[in-house]
Amino acid sequence: MITEKRYPHLPDEDTRLRTVCYAGLTAEYGETPDDGVIERLEKELSAIAVFGLSGVLLILRELVIKAELKKYELANRGTFGTSFVAWLCGLTPYNPLKAVMSLYPEFCFGLNWDRELSVQISVPDGKAEPLFEMLKTIEGVCDVAPLLSDTKHDIAFGRCIIPAGEKAEPAQCIKNHTPFFELIITTLTHLRLLERCVELTGEDPELINLDDKGVWELFKHTDHPACIEISPYHLSAIGLFGLRNFYSLILYNNVNVPLQSFADLVRIESLMHSAGAWNDNQEKLVYEQGARLTDLITCREDVYEYCRFQLGLNHKDSFAVAERVRKGRGIPEDLEEKVPADNRDKLKQFKAVCDKISYLLPRVHGYGCMVIAWRCAWYRLHYPVEFYQAYFEIVANPQIARAVFSGRSSYDKLTVYQPDLEDQEFDMKFSYDVDLAVADEMYFRGIDLTNVEPRKHIPDGVIQVRDLILPGQVTVLAGRPGMGKTALACDLVHVSNRKVMSTYVTLYEEADCIIERIALRGDKPCAVFTSLKDAFEIIELSELPDPLLVIDYVPSDEGEGSREVFEKLKNYAQEHHTPVLVISQISRKVDGRKNKRPLLRDLPMQDCLDTIDNVIMLYREDYYTGGSTGEAESIFVKCPLGIEKIHLIWDADRASFL
């Protein structure tokens, strides 16, 4: 048991948490709750107090309250959703004692109620960094420090909560090995979709019933008008595409199992998010043996329930098996000795399934995902115009979205000249086809978004620039002060690989300013530092594969010259196969020329050109004329690929490029 961790604490925190919980208990269950309910609450409160986590939960409660005041849509992931205390504090929307499927607290607190709470909160794109900034303002919190991973392929996307009066060093903030509380805040695009639907309609998603008959027909894909099959894509049950999660829907179309309840949707969602549970495993049971959805292992609780009620194991052994399987460790060799003789014939197939599973989600995770999908489906059914507007603003491929908002003729031209996606990952190719299918469905329903002004701008030009900043190369982005260099760098961070954290080193602006500017573009994990030395130390320590390293700017007066810094950056780029972008100002002499477009000779670090692969000069005519056309140019004055110029549009209101 780890009780020596340095968590934030508040005065009388155990008493305050108990007061909050019992107030919620009375509101839900009245003055005389059942003994079982009180017993569950007391067990959780005792476990939380032993770890010294009462203050943390109170801090998180205040964080959620602040987020809700700003109309953020929040959800939770992981086993935290099975905590009764978490529900009473408002930290999860699911009461585990009233769930439609059994949720066992042992998966959250451990078999002996001796497991440290793991808290993961999901927020819409663009809201993670603002939420962490809110956290810094709460009593008991000094700061939040980036939570790094100790393995190359495991990205933490979280923060350590640093108690008041303390300071954290980078080496203390390694995932699963930190003395501080780890808070993981993940982003979900479809939470942003849901949030946008709420903004456009004014309808409260909390009031949406999970038994709406119209929505249910969508998921059963009967003859509802939105469930048509549209040529040339031939995507059956097309009405479900555009809802989270696409893979769940593919499974349902392929298996075509009869859906009996919302719990069946939860099983599908859980199954398709659990690694090794379906492909080359239980799909054979469905196709070859006609297994039912309720027969499959879809989540951790299914393993427990099969051991407990099918194999006849006791509670302790059933839980131990579930813990092994969910971590990908398979069935223990001695399990047969513990299974009653009458049930051993069931063990062989169960073992074959479990031994192929590499990871299983908790049931509450699947439940939360399906609630989001159901609510999005409700808006899609009852407010189709608003739903499609939100979908093409938030979710869809930028190229398709731009065509849809430009009009039907633009969209028809796009479908004739589709991009070559053969070299892209399956996810990207499939998502592109889904977006086309959703657009076709929208037009089939007589909806056109030509006259709708989308909130989200589609940065086609920025994406073209991004594609020329290649791994293993050093690129310099240069221009006069105020031309928009930092804005373009933030845009490039936003459109870089969304699954991996970028790094931004700012020696020009405050870190909080850069964090805010990136967050305004939509959430993209990015570590921001104010020291080159600190950045390299942390990058090397975490061994993170970096999709983009931005240096704003390279100093020449801190112990080593510009050339030494550029050589170091070049070696780093090649060794780690990382694209490095360096921001630089150029000589003011350009302002005195008649033609003010910058040239390669205007770059100050001429002695470093042999270590620089690309040089991009940023130029806006409006900067000099005071006009408002917004036209901008990224001029490639040095580029091995022979590219000369990419046109951009400057959006002064958003301080961003298109």
Image (spheres, rainbow, N blue to C red):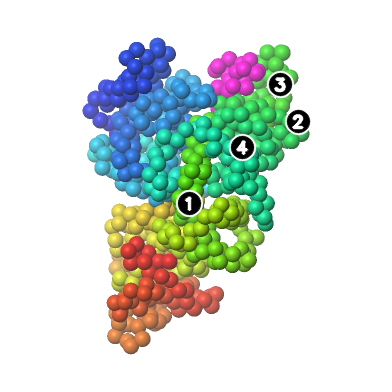
Report the residue at 58% width, 44% height from top.
Answer: 240
Marks 3/2 in contact by CB < 8 Å: the verdict is no
Crowding near the residue tagged with mark 3, few <14, some 14–19, many ≥20 C-alpha atoms within 10 Å? few
Residue 315 included in the magenta stretch of the image? yes
Q: Position of residue 309 (x, y in %)?
A: 62, 17
> Which residue lies under the disc numbered 3?
346
Of badges 4 and 1, nearer the viewer stands 1
Residue placed under numbered mark 2 in the picture: 289
Boundaries of the magenta span? 304-328
Q: Is residue 573 magenta?
A: no
Q: Is residue 468 left or right of residue 356?
A: left
Q: SS at mark 3?
A: helix
Mark 2, other Cα within 10 Å: few <14 / some 14–19 / many ≥20: few
Q: Which label belongs to residue 220?
A: 4
Residue 328 showing in the rendered view? no
Q: Are marks 4 and 2 in contact (CB under 8 Å)?
A: no
> Which picture quadrant has residue 182?
top left
Q: CA distance from mark 3 to mark 2?
A: 15 Å
Q: Residues within 10 Å of mark 4 (few under 14, many from 20)?
A: many
From the viewer's perspective, is residue 167 above or below residue 562?
A: above
The image shows residue 348 at horizontal and vertical percentages of 72, 24
Determine whether 649 is above or below 438 in the image.
below
Residue 560 vs residue 217: left or right? left
Q: Nearer the viewer, mark 2 or mark 1?
A: 1
Where does the N terminus fall, quadrant-wise? Answer: top left
Q: Secondary structure at mark 1?
A: helix
